[in-house]
């Protein structure tokens, strides 16, 4: 798991990137390629979260339609059925 940690020392912001193995790296000391890869990972995660959220909203919308349809139609009751 990756995370960013903010430390305020002497009114200077120090941002640390924590790698999945627990190593903390000062963001200012990260190489350009590491920064690029970190940004790509962040964008991928945001897109994955958006996709999951859309699926959940779509499923909720489907459930609401089914419930509405069931409420509008009384399935299983026929007063003329003997």
Image: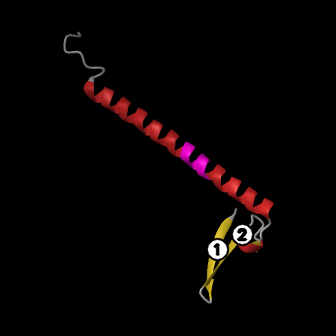
* Labels 2 & 1 near each other (Cβ < 8 A): yes
Q: Could you say where residue 63 lies in the image, as x and y percent from the top left?
A: 40, 34
Residue at the (65%, 69%) spot, across then down: 4
Q: Dot 2 surroundings within 10 Å: few (below 14), some, or many (20 or more)? A: some
Residue at the (64%, 52%) spot, across then down: 43
User: Horizontal placement of 56 versus 48: left or right?
Assistant: left
Which image quarter is the C terminus in?
A: top left
Q: Which residues are magenta?
A: 46-51
User: Horizontal placement of 43 versus 52: left or right?
Assistant: right
Q: Could you say where residue 6 lies in the image, as x and y percent from the top left?
A: 62, 76
Q: Secondary structure at mark 1?
A: strand
Q: Dot 1 surroundings within 10 Å: few (below 14), some, or many (20 or more)? A: some
Task: Find disc 2 in the rendering and name its residue.
Answer: 18
Q: Quadrant of residue 1?
A: bottom right
Q: Could you say where residue 42 lies in the image, as x and y percent from the top left?
A: 65, 56
Placement of 64 over or under 42, stated as above or below: above
Badge number at residue 80: none
28, 66: nearer the viewer: 28
Badge number at residue 5: 1
Q: CA distance from mark 2 to mark 1?
A: 8 Å
Residue at the (19%, 10%) spot, across then down: 80
Placement of 1 over or under 8, stated as above or below: above
Its colouring scheme is secondary structure
Residue at the (69%, 73%) spot, across then down: 16
Placement of 69 over or under 8, stated as above or below: above
User: Horizontal placement of 82 versus 70: left or right?
Assistant: left
Q: Quadrant of residue 12?
A: bottom right
Is residue 72 in the magenta section? no
Q: Residue furthest front?
A: 32
Query: Can the viewer see residue 26 in this picture?
Result: no
Q: Could you say where residue 35 lies in the image, as x and y percent from the top left?
A: 74, 62
């Amino acid at each position: 798991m990756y995370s960013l940690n903010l430390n305020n020392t002497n009114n200077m912001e120090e941002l640390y990137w924590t790698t999945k193995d627990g190593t903390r790296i000062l963001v200012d000391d990260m190489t350009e390629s590491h920064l690029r890869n970190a940004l790509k990972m962040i964008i991928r995660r945001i897109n994955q979260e958006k996709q999951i959220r859309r699926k959940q909203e779509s499923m909720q919308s489907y459930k609401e339609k089914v419930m509405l349809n069931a409420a509008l139609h009384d399935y299983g009751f026929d007063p003329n059925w003997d």
